[in-house]
Image (cartoon, rainbow, N blue to C red):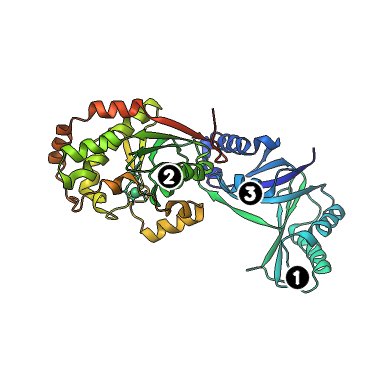
Amino acid sequence: MAKKLYLVKEGEISLKGGNRSHFEKKLRNNLKHKIRPYGSVIEKQKGRIFAYIDEECPDERIEKALSTTFGITGFARAYCVEKDIDIILSKAREILPSSTFGKKGTFKVKVVREDKKFFLNSHEVAIRLAEVVHEIFPDLTVNLDEPDYVLTCEIRSEVYLYTSSMRGAGGLPAGTAGHGMLLLSGGIDSPVAAFMMAKRGMKLDCIYYHAYPYTSELALEKVKTLASLVAPYLQGTKLYVVPFTEGQEHIRDNGYEEEATLMFRAAMMQTSTKIAKNDEATALVTGEALSQVASQTLDAMNFTDSMTDLVVLRPLVGLDKEEIVNTAKKIGTYETSILPYEDCCVVFSPKHPITKPHKEVARKHFEALNMDAIIDEAVKNTVVYEFDAMGNEITK
Ligand code: ATP
Ligand code: MG
């Protein structure tokens, strides 16, 4: 079957010294996994991956796969030709009319000459290709600093031509930096936290605390949608849904009202730690940002951290809401996050939550709640959903 070629640029991986091949292998596997149904072949040459994908695979699907795979800084639909200047020029003539080039504006030809033996130097190749551009688009002028359009020619063992390169997500390949559990609520913040930790290479699964009927089936559907939206960045993910109605009611009926959120957060930490350990994860990730709400003060974080022996990562801790919202929009989770179904924190929130808990006092109050049996029962009744690397739910 005919294939189309995508040229993929690796990012930070190329700086990885001795570990480089491990990172590269992971990136290639992650990519293969995402485009697999379309029989992709992935070859590697100095800082570049060549992905050959079946002609019938829709461009949007390929673009989604490539733009959500961490470790890639850019990619482009490319055309491969022999190392012969006449063939290069005639290929340029063929692809330019239907490329991203417009009739008006400026352009530049960029030549990467990896093969130093090629009989023309970069400048000479650029001039010959610029003549072709002028032939087809007589009104375009050259601008080397800020061109509207770029035609790139990479001369390697073969020659690659492309006109439109797209930005990749950057970062490091998912699965190269340990395994964590993300506490995923229905809000704006936690999906962004997932994106940020996955960007540094972490494999993540998600945990959601559901307090049905206080929180509706729709709230659960919303969280499942969020998990499916972040799954491509995470290279697939599991979503553990923990039934926590009894836990919430127990805290409401037996604790101090102003500490309700704090106690719930402590219970989430303990429960999540158990789920993490069952799945060999060694970190918990939350969407907290310092001082965003009452439970996100240093004292509160100090207390909730003391409820787990795992490392607690809060990648949004120093961000403003606006910055978080911008990222949520960029990764496509914002519209779902602002749907109005309440999460269980809101339903059980006290009117005057405590902002400066004393760690030891709060610990004693939590112990007095005696939640071990409730937590064990919640872990036992947890339901797991799974999403593949393209965000589709895997039904068993
Ligand atoms: P978000 O926008 O992520 O919901 P938030 O600003 O609403 O965050 P909180 O509700 O205090 O803040 O929650 C802080 C963090 O605690 C969330 O980012 C998430 O990691 C975790 N969390 C809160 N509620 C739940 C829940 N029901 N299930 C799982 N994790 C939760
Ligand atoms: Mg929330």
Question: Crowdedness of circle 2 by 10 Å Cα count: few (<14), some, many (20+)?
Answer: few
Give the residue type that dot 2 points to: Leu
Give the residue type that dot 1 points to: Lys
| Residue at image coords 68%, 57% | 164
Q: Quadrant of residue 130?
A: bottom right
Q: Is residue 177 left or right of residue 22?
A: left
Estimate the x, y position of residue 80 in percent, counting from the top left.
78, 47
| Disc 2 target residue | 218
Q: Secondary structure at mark 3?
A: helix
Q: Quadrant of residue 184?
A: top left
State the mark number for residue 63: 3
| Disc 1 target residue | 103
Instruction: Single out the mark in the foreground, 3 or 2.
Output: 2
Q: Quadrant of the N terminus?
A: top right
In front here: 42 or 379? 379
Residue 40 visible in the snapshot: no
| Residue at image coords 85%, 50% | 84
Q: Quadrant of the C terminus?
A: top right
Give the residue type that dot 3 points to: Glu
